[in-house]
Amino acid sequence: MKITITGSLGNISKPLAQELVQKGHEVTVISSSTEKQAEIEDLGASSAIGSVEDPAFLTKAFTGADAVYCMIPRANYFDPNLDLDAFTRKIGNNYAEAIKNSDVKRVVFLSSIGAHLEQNSGIIQRYNEIETILKKLDDVSITFMRPTSFFYNLLAYIPSIKSQGIIAANYGGDRLIPWVSPNDIAAAIAEEITTSLDGKKVRYVSSEELTGDETVRILGEAIGKPDLKWVLISDEETLNGLVNVGMQPKIAEGLVEMYAGLYSGLLGEDYIKNRPAEMGKTKLANYAKEFAAIYNQK
C-alpha cells in the first residue's frame, strides 16, 4: 500500500513508519523540518516537507495514497499567544479538506479518550469537534484511534518527585488510570491502516490499567524511591501549580478540567464500555526503565 503519515518522527509516527516499511508498504512521512528529511529516508520512507497548517500541501501529499494517518501536532502550552482551540480546529479542518480533495478513501485519525464528550473534557473537547467533521466525509472509511493517558506524561512530575518525593495531581490516587505506550498506539494504527473498513469506527488503545498508587509504586522501585507517594490535590491547587511554572492559564484550566474528568470517571465512561479486546504489550514496568534513565539525567 501507499501510505502517507503525519507527525514527522514523533513518539508514535516513527515506530509506525518503521513497522509499515518493514512490512513492505510504500510510506511517505510528512514533516515540517528539512532536518528530518535524511532520517526519514534512512528508515526507508519518503519525506514530504511542509506544514499541516497548509491544506494545499496536505492535499498534494495525500493524493495517490491508499491510506493516510492524521494527527494534531503537540503545541507549546507555555506560549502565551497560542490559541489552542483555534490551532486544533484549523488543522482538523485542513485534514477534512485535504482528504476530500485528494480523494483518499482510508483514514486513521489520532483522537483521544474522552472524545465522545461534547463538553466538560477540557483541552480535548476539540477532538469531539474534529471527529464530527470527519464523520461527515462521504465514501471515506475512518478509524478514530482513542488512546488513553500516555506513559511519558509522567515525566512532567520529575521536579516534584525530586523535591518532595511525591506526584501531586487532581486525579489518580486510588482511582484507575488507563495508561498507554506510544509503541502500542503505533502498532494499533499499523493494524488499522492496512485493514479494509466500510464506514467509520472507534478503537481505544491502552497498555495497562493502574491506580495512581500502583503507578508510583512501580516508578518508585525503578528510581530507587520506594516511598514515592501519589498525593491527591484540589483542582485549584493543580491549576495554581501549572500557572506558577509558566503554563498559559487558559490551557492550564483545560488540563485541570480534563484530569478532573479522568478522576470522576466522566472522561473514561465510553472507554470502560468499549475496552480494547487486548491490552498493548508495553507495561509501566517496561517504561519505568526509560523513565528512570531520564530521571537520573536531570
Image (cartoon, rainbow, N blue to C red):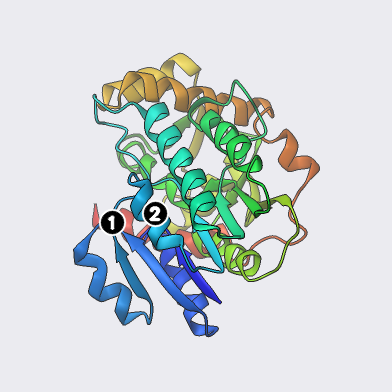
**Does residue 259 lie above or below 113 as drawn?**
above
Q: Are marks 1 and 2 in contact (CB under 8 Å)?
A: yes
136 with respect to 244 (left or right)? right
Q: Secondary structure at mark 1?
A: loop
Q: Amino acid at mark 2?
A: Leu
Image quadrant in which the N terminus is located: bottom right
Judged from this view, the residue extending furthest toward the left is 35
**Does residue 165 lie above or below 246 as drawn?**
below
Q: Nearer the viewer, residue 24 or 211?
A: 24
Which quadrant would residue 239 be assigned to in this image?
Answer: top left
- Disc 1 or 2, which lies upstream in sequence? 1
Which quadrant would residue 80 be assigned to in this image?
Answer: top left
153 with respect to 110 (left or right)? left
x and y, in percent, of residue 36 in the image: 25, 67
Residue name at image x 30 percent, y 27 percent: 247
x and y, in percent, of residue 11 in the image: 41, 59
Please name the residue that numbered disc 2 is placed on. 58
Q: Amino acid at mark 1?
A: Gly
Which quadrant would residue 5 be assigned to in this image?
Answer: bottom left
**Does residue 75 lie above or below 203 as drawn?**
above
x and y, in percent, of residue 70 in the image: 49, 53
Give the number of callouts: 2
